[in-house]
Image (tube, grey):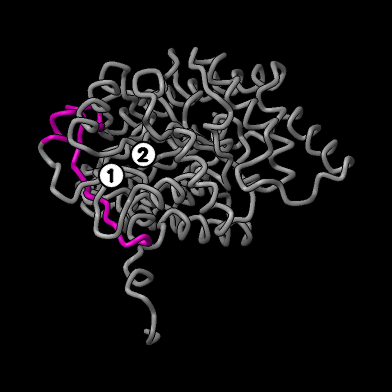
Amino acid sequence: MATGWADRAREIDSFKVMDLLKRAAELDAEGKDVVHMEAGEPDFPTAEPILRAAHAALDAGHTRYTPAGGIMPLRRAIADFYQQRYGVELKPERVLVTAGASGALLLAFSLLAAPGSRFLLADPGYPCNRQFLRLLEARGQLVPVGPETNYQLTPELIEQHWQADTAGVLLASPSNPTGSVVPRDQLAAMASTVERLGGRLIVDEIYHGLTYGFDADTVLDVASNAVVLNSFSKYFGMTGWRLGWLVADEAEVAEMEKIAQNLFISPATLSQHAALAAFEPETLAILEQRRAAFAERRDRLVEGLRALGFGVPLMPEGAFYVYADASHLTDDSYAYCWSLLEEDHLAVTPGADFGCNHPERYIRFAYTTGMDRIELALERLKARISR
């Protein structure tokens, strides 16, 4: 181990799905037929209207820095989107365009998570959240959740686990890895609880648009002072463009823009101009077709996994993941996932990425691949179990 390294660097865990992704790519390069169900990246290409807007931006010479908070036409477009989709009125000054939702989370925690403070996080949950907090000398306080609470925090759990140094709560709805959604009344109750306890509520809404049979409610409809994170990566299918946004009050946005100036200079200029086309009717029609395809994939994958004995007690309501109990097959899902990759050429993510709540039992399957590949994955799993 190198001397002089900061403790924070040593204590930040690797993002295990990225390790699996790297090895899967090596197997691909060797000519192996790997079924990819590990990464949270839609398999659909960026929608054509967005690509056209990017080409037009290049032709117009939009390749220089922008303001750190993003170009105002995009901030207005995002604010208009909240009015159209949720009926929530926003001033564009409350919107901050960021370098991906990860950039948004870093800015939000930089403002709200003082050194030594804690944020309550559901376990299982997205692994990088607690790593961001560690980077800022704060801590993620993991709260075990299960199907009895729809894999989400509740007002009662928040009250029970709140401590003197707790600064707030981070929710994700829909969530990664479980696909669970917090209904409107629960959002309101949790927002009220956090406010009464003197903390701040951050809500990750990056999978909004990818719910099946209904539309998720934004927390801004019940708690205007919440901080909201969103992204162009998931519903809008712009992962590699690295563009997201956050919503907060104007004073907080101004403060976070100052931090963004120092950390990022500005979001990617080309990505911002391309994203202006993300809200056009032509683009939204394409995205809704893809949403329907994800719903079909979810239904088939859950059906197939349950038939093979995997535990999926609740149908995932959103995102594009199934978090399945594989304890009938293994007591070490991390080793099992690596074995599936090396021996069966099926790439999935072990529960070890998502927290401390019995991770050895769980595997996350991402249905970010076509129906034919999902069928092949189920065939390979069946053959593996039969061996």
Local packing at callout 2 (Cα closer than 10 Å; few below 14, some 14-19, many 20+) is many
- The region drawn magenta spans 135-159
Amino acid type of disc 2? Pro
Amino acid type of disc 1? Tyr
Residue 88 picture location, percent across and down: 48, 16
Residue 262 picture location, percent across and down: 56, 59
**Quadrant of residue 312 within the rendered picture:** top left
Residue 44 picture location, percent across and down: 63, 33
Local packing at callout 1 (Cα closer than 10 Å; few below 14, some 14-19, many 20+) is many
Q: Nearer the viewer, residue 112 or 48?
A: 112
Residue sitting at 38 percent across and 84 percent down?
A: 4
Residue sitting at the far front? 251
**Element type where label 2 sits in the image:** loop
Whether 289 is drawn above or below 336: the answer is: above
Position of 259 with respect to 278 (left or right) is left
Q: Nearer the viewer, residue 184 or 377?
A: 184
Residue 177 image label: 2
Residue sitting at the far bottom? 3
Distance from label 1 to label 2 (Cα)? 10 Å
Residue 169 picture location, percent across and down: 27, 39
**Element type where label 1 sits in the image:** strand
Q: Is residue 367 in view from this perspective?
A: yes
| Circles 1 and 2: CB atoms closer than 8 Å | yes
Residue occupied by mark 1: 362
Q: Which of pointers 1 and 2 lies earlier in the amino acid sequence?
A: 2
Between disc 1 and disc 2, the foreground one is: 2
